[in-house]
Amino acid sequence: SLHDALPIFNDDFTVDDAKENILNLPNNRLISFKEILNNKYSKKRIVIFFITILELYKNNLIDLIIDNNEFYIKKGNNV
């Protein structure tokens, strides 16, 4: 089945893990959602990163930039 063909990643991934990953990204550089996922795709991981990005945006820790149907985050020096 298709599900068996997909790589399985550590299912213990949490919002705290996603937040740490994002806050450790370089400052002042556009980073795509695809790049944030780091080729580790699972529904859980995508949802966790998306929720984390929204939370960080709401708290003014990152900016969201939408361009050509792709969205990017940008972390400023204040983080």
Image (spheres, rainbow, N blue to C red):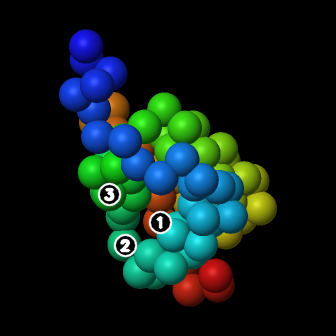
In the displayed structure, does residue 45 sit left or right of residue 19? left
Q: Residue furthest right?
A: 59
Instruction: Evaluate if marks 3 and 1 touch, with contact meaning CB atoms under 8 Å apart.
Output: no
Query: Which corner quadrant holds the N terminus?
Result: top left
Q: Nearer the viewer, residue 13 or 33?
A: 13
In the displayed structure, does residue 76 sit left or right of residue 25? right
Which numbered disc covers residue 74?
A: 1
Residue found at x 28% / y 25% = 4
Residue 24 in view (yes/no): yes
Secondary structure found at label 2:
loop
- Amino acid on which the number 2 mark rests in the picture: Arg
When asked about the image quadrant of residue 16, the answer is: bottom right
In the displayed structure, does residue 17 sit left or right of residue 67? right
Q: Nearer the viewer, residue 51 or 5?
A: 5
In the rendering, at what x and y percent does residue 48 appear? 60, 45
Q: Which residue is mark 2?
A: 29
